[in-house]
Amino acid sequence: MKEIRMFDVIHHTVKAFSHARLGPWQGLGDALLVGEGNLSFAKSLLSQPTAQITHMTATTYEKERNVSDNARQNALYLKQCGVLVIHGVDATNLEKSFRPHEFNTVIFQFPNVGSREAKYGQNPNHVMIRKFLRSAVQFLKPDGNVLITAVDNPHYQGTFRFNDSADFAGYEITKTWPFDPFLFSGYAHTNTNDDDSALDDHNRFVTHVFRLNA
Ligand SMILES: C[S@@+](CC[C@H](N)C(=O)[O-])C[C@H]1O[C@@H](n2cnc3c(N)ncnc32)[C@H](O)[C@@H]1O
């Protein structure tokens, strides 16, 4: 009897530990990924059993003719797995690419416009995130989540101003989770303007969970 209790405790502890490690990457349901670059995150996420993806739509901002060979190969793999892959999707204007649809989860990993030129006197990345969140409102189930991952430091927080962006677009940030890229086997993050990875220069990353205001 004692032994059974001990196993119960171990089982619950392991479960709680892996829940904490995987954070928001569980039970994602019908998921839309935007700004996927080389699509390696989409591919990796698909193979995570705990992600429980019922359907995936993986998109790149770049048009098909402009994506890398790696992205092309990953797109092929994803399509063979039943994923809908769409190129040329602007996250700030989803209504242009999608008919009315409500996803359980909308994901943008390491958004970056690749320019520092101010837009309307504001940081262009902040403007992009505000517009993305606003556009995603109509493509999210009322109890769905938008997940945005970024480098976790004051510079990037100041760049994106996630709390202001949430207020602007009608969301609240319900939780932030540390993001560990090494949990996503095969994920090869790349910059917007080259095939390098800015992640090599940083070691703290964070995923913000946005939920629509009730
Ligand atoms: C730093 S890269 C990250 C790529 C990929 N998400 C990853 O984690 O490897 C930023 C990505 O944002 C995309 N992007 C920039 N502006 C965008 C927009 N308006 N809509 C969708 N994606 C955009 C770029 O094309 C680029 O692929």
Image (tube, rainbow, N blue to C red):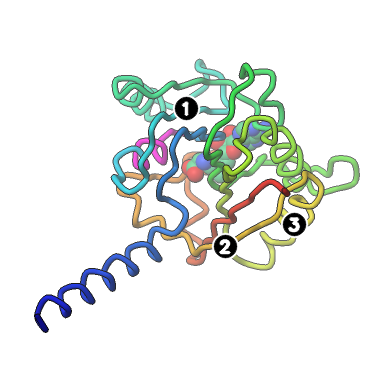
Type of amino acid under label 1: Thr
The vertical placement of 145 against 31, above or below, is below
Q: Which residue is mark 3?
A: 161
Q: Nearer the viewer, residue 90 or 57?
A: 57
| Residue lying at 49% horizontally and 64% vertically, measured from the top left | 178
The quadrant of the image that shows the N terminus is bottom left
Q: CA distance from mark 1 to mark 2?
A: 24 Å
Q: Which residue is mark 2?
A: 176
Type of amino acid under label 2: Thr
Label 2 near label 3: C-beta < 8 Å? no
Q: Which residues are magenta?
A: 38-45
Type of amino acid under label 3: Arg
Circle nearer the viewer, 3 or 2: 2
Q: Is residue 69 visible?
A: yes
The vertical placement of 142 against 1, above or below, is above
Q: Earlier in the sequence, mark 3 or mark 2?
A: 3
Q: Secondary structure at mark 2?
A: strand
